[in-house]
Image (tube, helix red, strand yellow):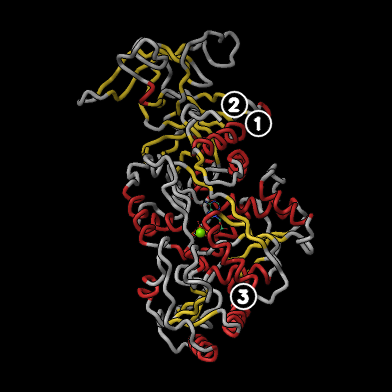
């Protein structure tokens, strides 16, 4: 378990008050309830944080419960991945449960609601139900099936379960109030027919409860005292309370909402991320541009940097959009301290040392981290043929260009000072090689080598350099400063939402990957394993990617060296 975060949130105050009022019998119990219809994103970590830290704060417990009441989009791949991600973030759940474990009990409660006159089977079509629901200003209209006798309702509901009817033929609805100002309370659907096998219960069920009915029941069965969720559930709270108060279960959970985490330049809701994956905008859930935990991990983010980010982003009650540069700032700080230094040339330009013998190779010491002398040095080979960054040379540079140019001097990192004497071009006039002379008395660290020059360049030795592909990323949504995603619960999914979805894809940045397929790495990086992180000097922080092969390494740029963000 992570250290208890320093949250002093309104949620903590509510819970403390409930304890003081004697409303909490036994321990504080929370749960994290993901729907296994996708991978976790960084927004979920906020929810995880709140669920786990509130339990810990009050010496309580937090369960992981899969909210798996809609088999159409759910599967075991997601169930497994979600558990991996939660462990990776360092959280440990108490009980692991599936909402589907409680289907039998949930069904029994539904029958009980029918017997109490609180629910009825409606045979109106989806279309009719939508039309008779009314609007914000117009009350809904009662269904013609609303007052059918209890016996008939029970019979139909049992036949629904027995599989007599096709999908959509009828639903079980709560009998609340078609004129309620809160549309959620206008006889919401409690059960629908879905002839679809379920990843946990197989073919056992062909009717499935809706979230709004199942969730409070699951909370009560597990003895949840505080059901913490994001703000889109706030208008559903009266329904949560209605279900709870009509169940004959002893528990009395309280729903408390908090703001969703939104980040600039990305989307933080599974249903949006899912479309990016399914429609091929990204290579998968773990595409390094994705704000999913698998994406962030592949991008090089550490759990510690994500925890740090959430602490700093805070836990306000109202919705807000956090600058994604704060997240970048957190990983930059982490890697600045913890990543080893190495040299990589993204776009190589050949340098030949004219006064260096063809067959002479020396080893130079290069420190692994300037702030950690105890991490030691690695030895890099240096011979007559080297490569530097093409960008580090200009034929006709401005005055303040402290890199290489004809007649100018630079130091090669941890090695010698060189001077560019001659520029060789190919038939198209492109610079293809620089002839440079070495000041043989200038080796870094050597006695007497205290001559200083303004610029220091990274480089690799042609004889030992390793080929690599480096991948740099830009934002998926550069035009999106705010929350283009209005979070919705599944039940709220509407045409307006579909509209938002279309819009968000139009803004996708198709130029969000830049490849350097001919990059070269210093030879020590041959030891790197997938997931190892480095600072490529003067370039940025990089992590070795799983697309690497024996012949060619692939590295993702996690974040640049420069910070444009002032926290
Ligand atoms: P979907 O789009 O499928 O509804 P989701 O991103 O809302 O996906 P859920 O599985 O519905 O994810 O959410 C699981 C839990 O995480 C819920 O308690 C929800 O309130 C919380 N949660 C989801 N997204 C965020 C977010 N961006 N910020 C904070 N909490 C979130
Ligand atoms: Mg959701």
Cα separation, mark 2 vs mark 1, equals 8 Å
Nearest to N terminus: mark 2 or mark 3: 3
Task: Report the residue marked by disc 1.
Answer: 375
Residue under the point 55% across and 65% down = 79
Residue 433, how many percent across, how many down? 32, 23
Callout 3 crowding tier (Cα within 10 Å): few <14, some 14–19, many ≥20: some
Residue under the point 72% across and 55% down = 55
Cα separation, mark 1 vs mark 3, equals 51 Å
Residue at far left of view: 427
Vertical order, 402 against 73 (above or below): above
Task: Report the residue marked by disc 3.
Answer: 101
Q: Nearer the viewer, residue 339 or 25?
A: 25
User: Helix, strand, or loop for circle 2?
Assistant: strand
Task: Report the residue marked by disc 2.
Answer: 367
Residue 123, by quadrant, is bottom left
Determine contact: label 2, label 1, CB under 8 Å. yes
Residue 33, by quadrant, is bottom right
């Amino acid at each position: 378990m992570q250290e208890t975060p320093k949250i002093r949130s309104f949620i903590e105050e509510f819970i403390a008050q409930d304890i003081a009022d004697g409303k909490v019998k036994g321990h504080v119990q929370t749960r994290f309830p993901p729907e296994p219809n996708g991978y976790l994103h960084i927004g979920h970590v906020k929810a995880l944080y709140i669920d786990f830290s509130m339990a810990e704060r009050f010496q309580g417990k937090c369960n992981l419960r899969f909210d798996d009441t809609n088999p159409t989009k759910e599967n075991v791949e997601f169930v497994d991945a979600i558990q991996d991600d939660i462990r990776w973030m360092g959280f440990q759940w108490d009980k692991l449960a599936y909402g589907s474990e409680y289907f039998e009990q949930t069904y029994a409660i539904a029958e009980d609601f029918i017997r109490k006159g609180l629910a009825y089977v409606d045979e109106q079509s989806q279309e009719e139900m939508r039309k008779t629901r009314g609007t914000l200003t117009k009350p809904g209209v009662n269904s013609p099936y609303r007052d059918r006798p209890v016996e008939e309702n029970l019979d139909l509901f049992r036949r629904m379960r027995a599989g007599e009817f096709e999908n959509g033929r009828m639903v079980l609805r709560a009998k609340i109030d078609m004129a309620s100002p809160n549309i959620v309370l206008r006889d919401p659907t409690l059960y629908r027919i879905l002839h679809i096998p379920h990843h946990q219960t197989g073919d056992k069920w062909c009717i499935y409860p809706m979230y709004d009915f199942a969730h409070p029941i699951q909370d009560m069965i597990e003895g949840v005292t505080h059901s913490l969720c994001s703000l889109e559930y706030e208008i559903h709270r009266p329904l949560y309370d209605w279900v709870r108060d009509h169940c004959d279960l002893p528990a009395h959970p309280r729903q408390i909402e908090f703001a969703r985490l939104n980040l600039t330049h990305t989307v933080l809701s599974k249903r949006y991320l899912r479309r990016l994956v399914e429609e091929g905008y990204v290579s998968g859930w773990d595409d390094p541009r994705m704000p999913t935990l698998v994406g962030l991990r592949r991008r090089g983010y550490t759990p510690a940097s994500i925890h740090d980010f959430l602490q700093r982003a805070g836990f306000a009650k109202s919705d807000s959009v956090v600058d994604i540069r704060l997240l970048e700032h957190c990983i930059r700080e982490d890697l600045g301290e913890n990543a080893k230094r190495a040299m990589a040339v993204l776009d190589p330009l050949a340098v030949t040392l004219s006064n260096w013998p063809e067959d002479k190779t020396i080893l130079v010491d290069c420190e692994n981290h300037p702030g950690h002398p105890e991490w030691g040095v690695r030895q890099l080979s240096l011979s007559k043929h080297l490569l530097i960054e093409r960008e580090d040379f200009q034929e006709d540079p401005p005055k303040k260009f402290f890199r290489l140019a004809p007649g100018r001097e630079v130091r090669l990192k941890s090695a010698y000072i060189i001077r560019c004497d001659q520029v060789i071009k190919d038939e198209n006039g492109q610079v293809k090689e620089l002839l440079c002379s070495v000041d043989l008395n200038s080796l870094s660290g050597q006695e007497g080598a205290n001559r200083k020059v303004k610029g220091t360049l990274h480089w690799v030795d042609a004889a030992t350099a390793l080929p690599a592909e480096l991948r740099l990323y830009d934002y998926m949504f550069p035009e999106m400063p705010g929350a283009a995603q209005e979070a919705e619960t599944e039940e709220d999914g509407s045409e307006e939402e579909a509209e938002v979805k279309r819009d968000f894809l139009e803004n996708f940045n198709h130029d969000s990957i830049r490849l350097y397929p001919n990059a070269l790495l210093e030879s020590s990086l041959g030891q790197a394993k997938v997931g190892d992180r480095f600072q490529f000097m003067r370039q940025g922080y990089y992590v070795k990617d799983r697309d690497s092969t024996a012949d060619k390494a692939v590295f993702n740029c996690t974040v640049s060296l420069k910070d444009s963000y002032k926290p």
